[in-house]
Structure formats: structure tokens, C-alpha cells
Image (spheres, coloured by chain):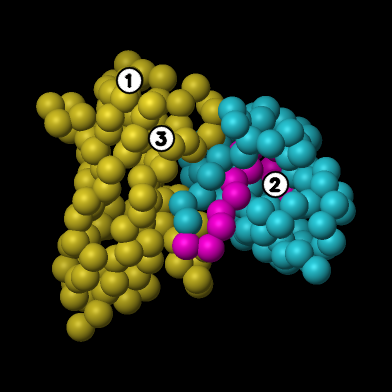
Chain colours: A yellow, B cyan
Amino acid sequence: QVQLQQSGPGLLKPSQTLSLTCAISGDSVSSKSATWNWIRQSPSRGLEWLGRTFYRSNLYNDYAVSVKGRITINPDTSRNQFSLQLNSVTAEDTAVYYCARERDWAGFDPWGQGTLVTVSS
Amino acid sequence: DIQMTQSPSSLSASQGDRVTITCRASQAISNHLSWYQQKPGKVPKLLIYAASTLQSGVPSRFSGSGSGTDFTLTISSLQPEDVATYYCQKYNSAPLTFGGGTRVEIK
């Protein structure tokens, strides 16, 4: 059974960097059949896909236009996890953040437990 | 980018009713569409992928159909535990956009 466990701080000040980690059990971040995703949810923006990292012949990343230039998603094969960094946060980045796996074109499953990140001075 | 539009945004139906939610893509996405159920305060749960394939463990009253730009999620007999918000998502290529959601309530 695959499980994703999120960790990271829940309170940030404007201009700081959001850093979250998603630890994987039961699968491998280096799998060539999976992609590893970050999603956030807020009342104003609904469910918003932020980006993904995945291995095929090489390492690939895709990012949402709304956060491009501020976001980095990295795999860590030694710890079997992947991370999200979002720079220069503002109050608009306040949301619940989720990690999720997609495997074999079969939708996002499982999801991490979610982390409420609040940006406030 | 491809936009995903769900309708209605909310609905109220009686227990046992047949409920249909639609999702329209602004461009064709083949069958690369998933449906999720989210109950208040909970993590989204995958119901259907590849437009019509039921995720393991999901009750058979849920079904999905469609291809190209128009998709539907049907609950054949609405149960109290189905009260939730339902989201579609495209995954043919990045960005993997979600629809705006449909809130389902029991009358």
C-alpha cells in the first residue's frame, strides 16, 4: 500500500520560502511509471495543480504558469521523497497543500494528508 | 491552456435519485480525465480515471463516460454518504487542470 507523508512548516511571513516534503512508502520516486505532484486548495482558487517531477529517460519537471519562476519540485532518491519550494510567498499562497502520485495514467492516488500553509505578517 | 468547466456548480437531490455532473474541456483530451470526491475537511479521493474506469473499492453506483471534450459522472442512486464536492481533472498533458467542482447535497 503506497502512502505519502507530508512535512513542513505551516506558518510563513510574506517574502519567505515555502518548503514542503512528501515522503514515499510503497513506491519509488525514481519509478519510470509514476509522476509526483503538488496541488494546493484554497476557497478562492479551488484545486490548483502546481507541478510535478518524474523520471523517464531523464528527470523532467512541469510547472503551472501561475507559479512558474517561483516554484521548484525536486526528487530525493536517497530519501525516497520529493519536495516543493515556493519562493517569495504572499497571502495569496495561503492554502492547503497536497502531494499526490499519478501512476500509469490512472489518476492521482494516493494523496498526502495535506498541510495548511498560512502566509501572514 | 485547456480549461475544464463543470456544471452545475451545486445540486440538491433526494436519496435514491440519479445524479449527473458534466465536465467540458475547451479542447479534446481523449479519455485522459479523472473524477474525485472530496468530503468536508478530507483529502480528495479518486473515483474514476480514464474517463470511465472505476477505481478499486469505489461503489458501483458511480460511473463515468465521455471522450474528447464532454464527460459525465453519474451517481445512479444517491446515498447520504455521497454528500461531497466532486471535481474533474484532465491529465493528458501539463498543466493538469481541475474543474471548479460540483457540490452535491441531499434534499
Label 3: chain letter: A
Tell me which residue sits at (73%, 39%) in the image: B62
Q: Nearer the viewer, residue B105 or B92?
A: B105
Packing grade of label 1 (10 A; few <14, some 14-19, many >=20) is few
Return the residue found at the far right. B17
Query: What is the magenta range?
Result: B23-41
Is residue A6 left or right of B96 when viewed as pictured? left
Q: CA distance from mark 1 to mark 2?
A: 30 Å
- The residue indicated by pointer 1 is A31
Is residue A98 left or right of B50 when viewed as pictured? left
Tell me which residue sits at (53%, 63%) in the image: B40
Label 2: chain letter: B
Q: Are marks 1 and 2 in contact (CB under 8 Å)?
A: no
Q: Which mark is residue A64?
A: none
Label 1: chain letter: A
Give the amino acid type for the residue marked by disc 2 in the picture: Ala
Residues marked 3 and 2, same chain: no
Residue A50 locus on image (x, y percent): 40, 51
Q: Nearer the viewer, residue A78 or B67?
A: A78
Give the amino acid type for the residue marked by disc 3 in the picture: Arg
Q: CA distance from mark 3 to mark 1?
A: 11 Å
Query: Callout 3: helix, strand or loop?
Result: strand
Give the amino acid type for the residue marked by disc 1 in the picture: Ser
- The residue indicated by pointer 2 is B25
Residue B64 locus on image (x, y percent): 75, 37
Q: Quadrant of residue A77?
A: top left
Asked if residue B35 lies in the magenta stretch, the reply is yes
Mark 1 or 2: in front is 1
- The residue indicated by pointer 3 is A101
Q: Quadrant of the N terminus of chain A?
A: top left
Q: Are marks 3 and 1 in contact (CB under 8 Å)?
A: no
Return the residue found at the far left. A78
